[in-house]
Image (spheres, rainbow, N blue to C red):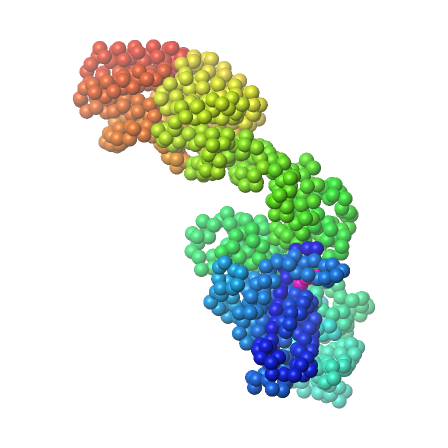
Amino acid sequence: MSRRLVAVLFIDLVGWTSLAERLDAEPLQQFLERYYDICVTAVDRHGGIVEKFIGDAIMAVFGAEWSGEDDGLRALRAALQTRSEVSRLAVSGLDPAGPGVHCGIAAGEALVTRSAHAGVRIVGDVVNLAARLQSAAQRDEILLNEVMVRLVRSHAVVAPMPPMKLKGKREPVPVWRAVELADASAPVRTGVPFVDREAERTGLVEAYRAVTSTGRAQALMVLGPPGIGKTGLVHEAVERLLGETPTPLLISGACQSFAATGSYGPLGQMLDALLSHADVARQAATIRGGRVLEVLAQLRTPTTADGEASGPGTEEISWAVRELLACAATDPLALVWEDLQWAEPALLGIIADLADRLLDHPVLMICVARQELRELPPRNPNDGPDWQTVHIGPLGRPHTLDLVGSLMARGQPAEVVAHDMDVVDRIVDDCAGNPLFAELMVETLALGYSLGDVPPSITALVGAMVDRLPPAATRVLEVASVIGTTFTREQLATMAVESAEGVLDDLVRRNLIACARPGEYRFAQQPVHDVVYGRLDKRQRLDWHRELARQPVNRAFHLEAAVHLLRVLAPDDPELPELAQRATSALLSDGTTALRRRNLPAAIGLLRRAQDVPPGANEAAHALVAVRLSDALLLGGDLAGARAAVERVIEESPGSRAGVACRIQLGLLAVRSGQDGEVSVAELTEDLRHEEADQLSWCRLDQLHMLRYLAQGRFLAAEQSARAALRRAEEMNDGYERDRLLAALCEVGQWSPTPIPQKLAFCGEVATRFAGDRCLLVPVLVAQARLLALAGRLDAAAEALAQAHQSVMDLRLTMAAVLVEQGYGAVAAVAGEHERAERHYRSAAQGLEDAGHRPAALAVRALAVRERVRWRCDDRAVVEIGALRDQAAAMDLHGRLVAAAAAARVVAESGQPPDDEADEVLRLLARTDDPCLRGDVLTDLALAHRRAGDGDRARRMAQAAADSYAAVGASLPGSGIRERS
């Protein structure tokens, strides 16, 4: 039992009911037998199997037991042959138009089973679709589904039809009508631009030059996997050859995968091309009294009227072809044999014989094949030329980028392609240097499919390659596909798979896998992995994922896969809830690890997958997944996504324990975005009164209190709430929450009334603890830098900021970069470098605005304007102060205080007494317990009163500022405050 891409063909007679009514049973039976014989013969000739007879209808399947990359084309050829031959049946009393058929062909995935009683059976929607298409087809029509069209587009002419409403389908189905086959003798040229391969192309040209200079034959074997660009390379080289002097007579032919047994493939094409030259035909007519032409004519018509084989044997054919080529090779001759992997052994023998016997003629022979054709049949090495083998490997990454970029740019402006660079990179990674794979992936995107959808042409190619593998190699590939895109010999051994070096080496030679490092392998292209995995039946996948989940590597991946498979195969299985819980816990663990390392893309991906695991996880894990996902999205600057992650749980289970935790998280996000009014802390607290064990919710509620106290300017209360949350995190033994809160305490502590030496000591302890985790270390270093500057240690502050900045640059931490800019602004402000401080504050404010943190952005923008007022109170400062005052309702207390104090200085600079502004500052100041903030705004008031000529008030304000600074040990801003005021 396996899942395969198959092509299903339904053939049905037109007017069978009417015919049965008019004909006697015996002639009717004779007609039916001839019709069946035509259908069965056509299906058998093209490699299909007849799965069933349904009255006068026949169902045939291509690719059921043995995949071919051209199964779709074979099905279409069988339908065309049947239609042609049935139309020539003579039936007495039949309609003058003669008998006719109507056909439907659908390609798609199906489950293929075989049993002793029922034989081969095909199960899947593709069967129903093919039957519906056949029913919808008119007389002599062959209707195709979209997958079929994508499989045969290079080999057939098809015409789109209006989408059809078919029985059993909710939506109209896209349908195409097969018109005719393309010319099989014409080489199939894809639209892939030619890139790289200059060395190989030059090598082919040099081989031809050697032929013309020595007059002796050269033979080249061009080998490579499907789609790697062998044909494109040879065609490009041939174009160059036609520009050489002397110009060669170029003769080419290609083997067809659907050729009948006993066929000599491209010989017919090449002979017709040669004999179209009058001089060659005239000379050939004189050889052995025209025997050469007689043999060649019989070669092209190898059967007699009664169907029995006739004509010359292989030896005589080889002789005749050799004589003909010798006639043509009076001038340089270039022979190109394409797709020799499909060649019959007899043809390969003829080619080897030609290379041996034409050694003394100016002939360049180029044989193009896939790597499974290692060499031609044995020959006498002393007689023939030295064969050169040209191996075509994958394109390098730079050339693959060029190729994918040019494919995507067709019809699109450059800026669109630039916008899709993530998509380009994904295609480059997945195609692994295979030009055809790249083209098909880009085409898949253009058709509206996602990158994860493997194009059916690739599925067919890979399926055909896998079916030609020895059983041991197939087994290795199948197990490896369940392990993952990378795997080791040890992992294969745990699954009791024979991973002998020879098997793995053979798979590497076939370009199905690649050796990443000794003992470790990876699938050469992502689609190869996807196709091999997709062909396994789901029960087998489930069993292997369960087994691999017992291993220490990728447990989360295998548990998750097992859950989804079991849910499809047995949704009522009692094991499902427990398995889902294990999968959720494993994904949560991996996602949290990635989050702690600030690997945000990985964290978001893992946590989304954890949230998508079907029901079964307990509520605590369900809440934790949503909260951690929200954190990851917020760190990445996606505030809307952070909200959506928890809103989903609230909607799905509003009254649950998980719902309460997510409502608290939503409250945290609301405060950060300036929507504190939407949060009812009292309601959340009431909901938790009976949930004492829900430590996560209590921990997050303490953090919500912390953020609200910060917005209110109550920094001691904020610090106490942070410490309460930290205690709960330690009780939960939750390292992620604990580390976040340690960093938060350093940040919050900057503003609290705790003395600076004590805060610096705490930051030092935390910095030591986070020495190995630079992501967590950055906010601690920024807090430490500001505290050091306040204590007058500017050199140490600069050193801490430089370390934080380097970490941000090395690790590309977007939001941490904003924090570092804010730290630079704070230290510059303390040092009196107001212009520099303004610049850094403006940069930080823009970053906060971009991330959606509006209250914080407004507060930092107020700091930037304050610094501008301090060094240059110009019109811009006046306008910006006015704009900030208009937005006071959206600002936290810190921002409102800074803006009001700066406004007082602006008023004083204009020569007016800043009484109203000063009164507002003092009212607000009574609400905060941040000594340094008090010192800053009182200093601004002192300077404003002094500018307005009120010396007494200036001195009182300066004294109050100095006292505030001294209360926590902020020696640098406190020094000389009276003189400055």
Q: Where is residue 969 in the image (x, y as percent from the top left)?
A: 40, 12
> Of 887 and 238, which appears nearest the observer?
887
Badge count: 0
Compared with residue 843, is residue 928 higher up or lower down, i.e. above or below?
Answer: above
Indicate yes or no whether the magenta region holds residue 64: yes
Q: Position of residue 487 (x, y in %)?
A: 68, 44
Q: Is residue 410 in view from this perspective?
A: yes
Q: Give the range drawn in magenta.
A: 62-68
Prevailing secondary structure of the magenta residues: loop
Which residue appears at 58% of the width and 79% of the height?
A: 18
Q: Is residue 240 in view from this perspective?
A: no
Q: Which residue occupies the extreme left position in the image? A: 912
Which residue appears at 38% of the width and 18% of the height?
A: 714
Which residue appears at 67% of the width and 75% of the height?
A: 36
For residue 247, what is the image quadrant?
A: bottom right
Quarter of the figure that contains the C terminus? top left
